[in-house]
Amino acid sequence: MREAYHVELEDLAANLADMSLQAAAAMKKATQALLEADLSLAEQVIGDDQKIDDARAESEEKAYALLALQAPVATDLRTVLAVIHAAESLERMGDLALHVAKAARRRHPQATLPEPVRNYFAEMGELDVRLAEKVADVIKSRDVEAARALEEEDDRVDEIHRHLFTVIMDPDWKHGVAAAVDITLLGRFYERFADHAVSVGKRMVFVATGKMPGYAHDEDL
């Protein structure tokens, strides 16, 4: 029985890691759809979002079943609790990629992003994808230092997000109000995706150490 119980715990972690990779793939495709006005890719992200939602539901169901039937303690209890919270963040990451894809679809066949900001979104997309892929590794390895290092890339996303406001508020901005609104919303989607990735990493630190690190963005998480 105990061996089967630990297999179930390992399965929970594997499910979470897979969710993070799904979110990474979704954001990679969504960013490409955004930059290239690729309707087919945008539709693919939109159609696949339910898979991440289903994975969250499955993870939570298994986690609650373990709480009810096995009464885990110490590290095992922290693992189950972390799964419940992390699954929510990972689903949100998928939803944020979905929002990016929907923005690309809404403006198709026109480009959503004017030229002055395209490189910023390309970089944020790369950072977000890399963060989600690293989160998958952290979930499997429970590497505390790797989890803490996620904040460095999140800081760069925050920096770009802040800079976007200076770009659209510049008196020389010539791309209109609609583009500025799109950029504001899209920048927020990328920034929140990174924040949720860091949140999952901190849940893994909690599993490994029993201590929950502080958040730089507590009011948003």
Image (cartoon, rainbow, N blue to C red):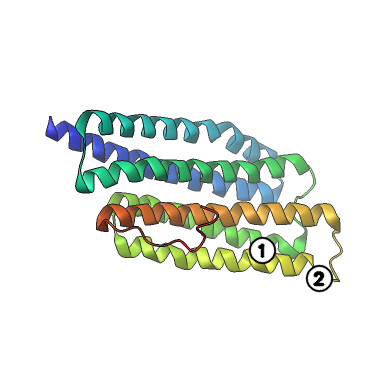
Amino acid at circle 2: Asp
Residue 213 drawn at (x, y percent):
37, 61
Q: In this orientation, does residue 108 appear?
A: no
In the rendered view, tell whether residue 179 sits above or below residue 55.
below
Which of labels 1 and 2 is toward the front? 2
> In percent of the image, x 28 and y 37: which residue is there?
11
Residue of label 2: 170
The N terminus lies in quadrant: top left
> In percent of the image, x 62 and y 40: which residue is there?
41
In the rendered view, tell whether residue 8 sits above or below residue 159.
above
Circle 2 SS class: loop
Place residue 176 in its image quadrant: bottom right
> Dot 1, crowdedness within 10 Å: few (<14), some or many (≥20)?
few
Numbered disc total:
2
Q: In this orientation, does residue 50 appear?
A: yes
Q: Sequence-wise, which precedes: disc 1 or disc 2?
A: 1
Tell which of 82 and 95 is nearer to you. 82
Q: Indicate left or right for 141 with 184 as reference.
A: left
Residue of label 1: 119
> In percent of the image, x 64 and y 35: which residue is there?
43
> In percent of the image, x 31 and y 55: which residue is there?
206
Place residue 163 in its image quadrant: bottom right
Residue 79 drawn at (x, y percent):
28, 45
Circle 1 SS class: helix
Q: Indicate left or right for 203 with 101 as reference.
A: left
Q: Indicate left or right for 18 with 35 as reference.
A: left
Amino acid at circle 1: Asn
Residue 59 drawn at (x, y percent):
37, 34
